[in-house]
Amino acid sequence: MIAWIPNGITLGNLVLGCCAILLVNNNPIASIYCVIAAAILDFFDGFAARLLKVSSPLGGQLDSLADVVSFGVVPSLWAHAMLPHNSWIQYIPFMIAAGAAYRLARFNLDPINTSGHFKGLPVPSNAMIWMGIFGYQMDSFSAFNPLLIIGASIVTTLLMISTTPLLSLKFKGLGWKGQEIIWILLISSFIILGATYFVMDSFFLGILGVMGLYLILSLSYYKKISS
């Protein structure tokens, strides 16, 4: 029965993803809050499994199934909602959900990562990018150019299915040495979020800024150490 504690948390993630789907058009802010709550549960299910020492293959599979809904399908529907619905281009963002499913299936076949970095964009990070885009559009009360949404759909999908090394944010202790790049990202993220919220009155723009910095630092860092 104890094993069902983390599994129940994972299923809560899935249920919140389903709620987010229903709310995309009628209450987009609530849809975003559902995904934020799903991300919190996504963190705590693994934490609970390790704490209770009940990690299992079933739990890993459930986690991926929940993630593909909350962090793959929902972002694709956010992007879909931002495109004109009188054209076939409205269906292009569904590639985001397909990319998320592929990324998670690949991870399930090779869950042990000893490289110290992510292979491709993590699916929750994909959701954060689209949360920033979708939320900022609501903040600014203006529609993005459809070409921007289509371009972002293609880029985020390619990043997920790629094996491009990206920073893992798992700390090994609290020391600075050997973890400088992660500390720089963390400190800079707080500065960006604070500046955009208090100066520009936009939390979602801050999320976009943080994710942009994450990608820039990751790509530059791994390019440097591989050269």
Image (cartoon, rainbow, N blue to C red):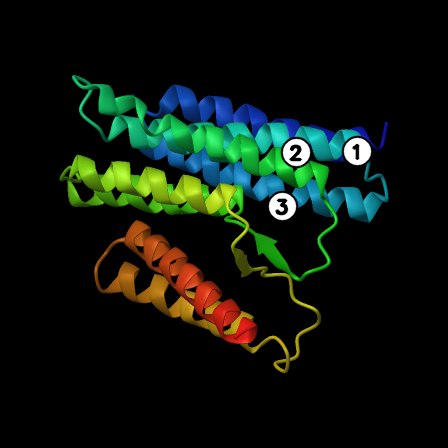
Label 1: how many Cα within 10 Å (few below 14, some 14–19, many 20+): few
State the SS at label 2.
helix
The alpha-carbon separation of the residues under discs 1 and 2 comes to 10 Å
Amino acid marked by disc 3 = Phe
Residue type beneath disc 1:
Pro
Q: Residue at x 47, y 41 (%)?
A: 36
How far apart marks 3 and 1 lie (CA) works out to 17 Å
Q: Residue at x 51, y 38 (%)?
A: 37
Dot 1: element: helix
Residue occupying image coordinates x 26% and y 53%: 202
Distance from the alpha carbon under mark 3 to that under mark 2: 10 Å
Q: Nearer the viewer, residue 208 or 158?
A: 158
Circle 3 or circle 2, nearest the eye: 2
Which residue was labeled with disc 3? 43
**Residue density around tag 2, few if under 14, some if 14–19, many if 20 or more, within 10 Å:** many
Kindly identify which residue carries mark 1: 57
The residue identified by callout 2 is 63
